[in-house]
Image (cartoon, rainbow, N blue to C red):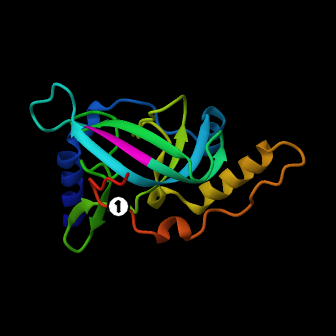
């Protein structure tokens, strides 16, 4: 009981700023696939995080992330392509940090009755609508690979196969461990 009350307090107090973000829930995989121009798995290459213009509090950030595409299910992107996201984070903005800083995803430590920021590998599944830069957002379906289930990957493989022109031979295999095997660069790592 005490753990449940503590968790509730952490969630209410620690995530209070998130209530200012207002949007509809993420869509079902098939709907998000249909509505997206590009759907792909990508690994963070570089991250540039600067204070949002006009912010003097230090609570609002604009994060620009350069991703390298690992696998594509839909669109013009191909493995090795570069994709860019730009997200406004902090306060009540709906944007998500690719590195979870500021924290938007927490891991519950039941023994200590606390939460801690979830550590991400740097690999993201991105559903992109429109051109670049795309925004990583609570309102969309893009998410770190740690939040992607096998069922979602299987459905994307099925949707890619169904959408392939007749006679084409789409890949049937979901992304393997190679997508998670390479360590991602640390925050602020700038590779040219």
Quarter residue 111 falls in: bottom left
Instruction: Check if residue 129 falls in the magenta segment.
Output: no
Regarding mark 1 in the picture, which secondary structure is present there? loop
Q: In the picture shown, does residue 39 fall above or below 23?
A: below
Q: Residues within 10 Å of mark 1 (few under 14, many from 20)?
A: some
Which residue sits at x=60%, y=35%? 36
Quarter residue 54 falls in: top left
Q: Please name whichever residue, 156 or 19, is drawn nearer the observer in this view of the structure.
A: 156
Residue 82: x and y in percent read 51, 45
Which residue sits at x=48%, y=67%? 180
| Image position of 162 (left or right of 2) | right
Extreme residue toward the left, this view: 56
| Image position of 20 (left or right of 70) | left
Q: Quadrant of the N terminus?
A: bottom left
Q: Which residue is mark 1?
A: 185
Q: In the picture shown, does residue 62 fall above or below 177?
A: above
| Image position of 20 (left or right of 46) | left
Q: Please name whichever residue, 51 or 27, is drawn nearer the observer in this view of the structure.
A: 51
Which residue sits at x=32%, y=32%? 21
Residue 72: x and y in percent read 63, 50
Residue 86: x and y in percent read 37, 36
Which residue sits at x=41%, y=30%? 23
Quarter residue 115 falls in: bottom left
Residue 40: x and y in percent read 58, 48
Q: How many marks?
A: 1
Q: Which residues are magenta?
A: 62-66
Extreme residue toward the front, this view: 192
Extreme residue toward the right, this view: 167
Most frequent secondary structure within the magenta stretch: strand
Instruction: Check if residue 65 falls in the magenta segment.
Output: yes
């Amino acid at each position: 009981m005490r753990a449940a009350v503590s968790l509730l307090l952490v969630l209410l107090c620690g995530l209070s700023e998130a209530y200012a973000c207002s949007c509809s829930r993420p869509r079902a995989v098939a709907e998000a696939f249909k509505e997206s121009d590009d759907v792909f798995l990508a690994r963070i290459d570089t991250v540039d995080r600067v204070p949002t213009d006009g912010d003097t509090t230090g609570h609002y950030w604009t994060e620009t992330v350069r991703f390298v595409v690992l696998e594509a299910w839909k669109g013009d992107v191909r493995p090795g392509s570069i994709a860019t996201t730009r997200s406004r984070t902090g306060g009540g903005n709906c944007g998500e940090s690719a590195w979870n800083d500021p924290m938007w995803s927490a891991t519950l430590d039941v023994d200590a009755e606390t939460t801690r920021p979830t550590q991400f590998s740097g690999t993201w599944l991105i559903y992109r609508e429109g051109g670049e830069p795309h925004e990583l957002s609570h309102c969309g379906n893009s998410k770190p690979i740690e939040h992607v289930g096998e069922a979602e990957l299987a459905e994307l493989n099925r949707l890619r196969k169904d959408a392939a022109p007749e006679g084409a031979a789409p890949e049937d295999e979901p992304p393997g461990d190679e997508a998670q095997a390479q360590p991602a660069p640390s925050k602020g790592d700038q590779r040219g």
